[in-house]
Image (cartoon, rainbow, N blue to C red):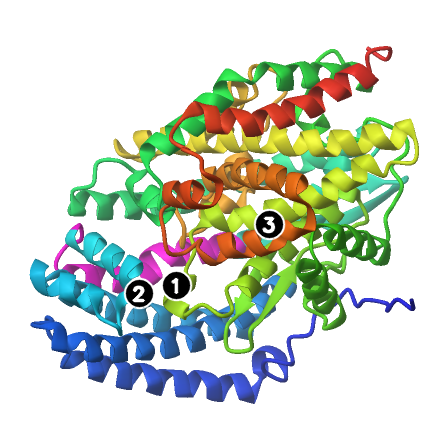
Amino acid sequence: MKTKTYSEVWDLDVFFKGGSSSPELRSHLDSLHLKLDSFEKTLTTFDIPKSSADAEKIAFVISETKNVAENLSQAGAVVGCYLAQDTTDKKANMLQGEIGSIGARFSSSMLVIQQQLSKTEENVWTTLMDSEQLKEFSFVLNEWRDEAKELLSEKEEDMITALGVDGYHGWGQLYDLLVGDVKVRVTVDGEEKEFSVGQASNLSSHSDETVRKEAHYALENAWTEKEEFFAKALNHMAGFRLAVYKKRGWDSVLKEPLQMNRMKQETLDAMWGAISNHKQPFVDYLKRKSEMLGTSAMNWYDLDAPVTASTEKVSYQEGAEFILKHFGKFGPELEQFSRKAFEDEWIEAEDRPNKRPGGFCTGMPLSQQSRIFMTYSGTMSNVATLAHELGHAFHSYALRPVHWMNRQYAMGVAETASTFAEMIVADAAVKEAKSAEEKLALLEDKIQRSVAFFMNIHARFLFETRFYDERKKGLVSATRLNELMEEAQREAFGNGLEEVHPHFWASKLHFYITRVPFYNFPYTFGYLFSLSIYAKAIEEGSSFEEKYIALLRDTAIMSVEDLAMKHLGEDITKHAFWEKGIALCIQDVEEFLELTSSKG
Ligand SMILES: [Zn+2]
């Protein structure tokens, strides 16, 4: 079979020709303004439903909502891609501001709908939810109604949304700008070169300790130099959030993120509780790794260090083919879908300057397509990231037959499909290893994922909860933020680290995402949740794909507790569920310790 050469640069022209100066995009936005005008007009006559006869009218409003939302998402996603591929794109920056304002207006309209629905009398509501037109949307509508009851008056919420454009989201955008501006100089292969944050971060897995260390300190210095700017942004974002919560009478900063994740506090507690009880094997792993690296203790800058010399570069093409081969073993749909994503240039992976750091997947609903963004530098971990983002895209694909209203899945389950895809590739890589050295490197790559989810992300969660606690009492200085981060990292890594990364709070984009608070625990949730799905997939073979797609289709219409019960028959508010997933990860560590016992 002849294989195609896949482009490392994505195609965005298929949506709007000409990038951020595109006339097509301009007219799309102009017509979006008009659509929103007429939507807002429709809503001026949208009263509190009085009887079951109003079902028709609500259904109409839902279809209008879908229309505006899809057009808005389409523009937002494409402009987000423009900015990610070139952080210096000033026009895209302007467009992002414009789309932000449209988004705020749209959110206000959504609130009007939610407020009106929340005032519906209980008996009318029950008949509406049973009606032919609305039955399909009852989970989401009930959720809206419940949430609206917790909000302030329409006028007040309206004002919060409007002020949030500049007083909240603006801080997040400022962060992106600041990071794009950070350049560090690192000597690699005897030559000093300038690196963007994304490129310098990729050096954390460089085989040369000097390079890793130099990149780490160059970044730490860069963050230190600008720490006041980052501290300012972080404090004001958090301050805005807390002020809003206080006005609404919400005590816990976790209320919103839990609600957004359709998750109970008990579930979150059970998850972190089970993880905290099983840190030791991972601490043992860190210790062994530091011995293998010839250092007395594990340091932050060595966490991603390769443990063997066989760190072969994987070309983009090879990486793509590896992914497709193993996706194919799991299920035909995932493979065919991903092949198309490669062929149709859905992926931006080129290693070049001025790109935003990190990776993401975004959906263009009007075109029923997704786009994947990352910087591919040829490591197996990059291949896994690519698989991860393809998993996200596959989730959107699985949801294609589902109405927009029932497609709005939360982050925890969003990370399920991505982690699942990543796991297929990571596991396959270990099993297919051609030498003991390679096997070790790949096994380690897998364990590093557990370290990331059980330790690194746990540290982020601990930091964020503690930071919020202190922020309630006033501004938190950069020095204090460093202390809080250091404490969180020491604890989350089970005291397995000597040198930590105090400025991590400045370096990690996730703390500055305004759309989603607590952009951390859902990752760990998704990881462990998908591990149990993965275990079932191995048991059942490729016939499992149908069930897997059914689970993905249900991800936006029930709580995570119900989803696990329906599709997996598991109670996730109990430690026992989480321990099963953790046990799989501990097996990897045990295998690693055994393979390396002579090297210790
Ligand atoms: Zn993800």
Left or right position of 87 against 259: right
Which range of residues does the magenta coloring cover? 150-176
Q: Does the beta carbon of the residue at mark 1 sit less than 8 Å from ligand 1?
A: no
Q: Position of residue 121 (x, y in %)?
A: 7, 62
Say which of 331 and 118 sits in front.
331
Q: Is residue 538 visible?
A: yes
Q: Residue at x 14, y 67 (%)?
A: 116
Under mark 3, the amino acid is Ser
Magenta run includes residue 162: yes
Q: Earlier in the sequence, mark 3 or mark 1?
A: 1
Left or right position of 323 against 139: right
Q: Tell me the CA gap for discs 2 and 1.
A: 7 Å
Q: Is residue 359 visible?
A: no
The residue singled out by tag 1 in the image is 406
Estimate how packed mark 2 is, as few (under 14), some (14 to 19) or many (20 or more) residues with alpha carbons within 10 Å: some
The residue singled out by tag 3 in the image is 418
Indicate which label's residue lies in the foreground, 2 or 3.
Answer: 2
SS state under label 3:
helix
The residue singled out by tag 2 in the image is 137
Say which of 340 and 38 sits in front.
340
Magenta run includes residue 194: no
Question: Do callouts 3 and 1 mark residues in contact (Cβ within 8 Å)?
Answer: no
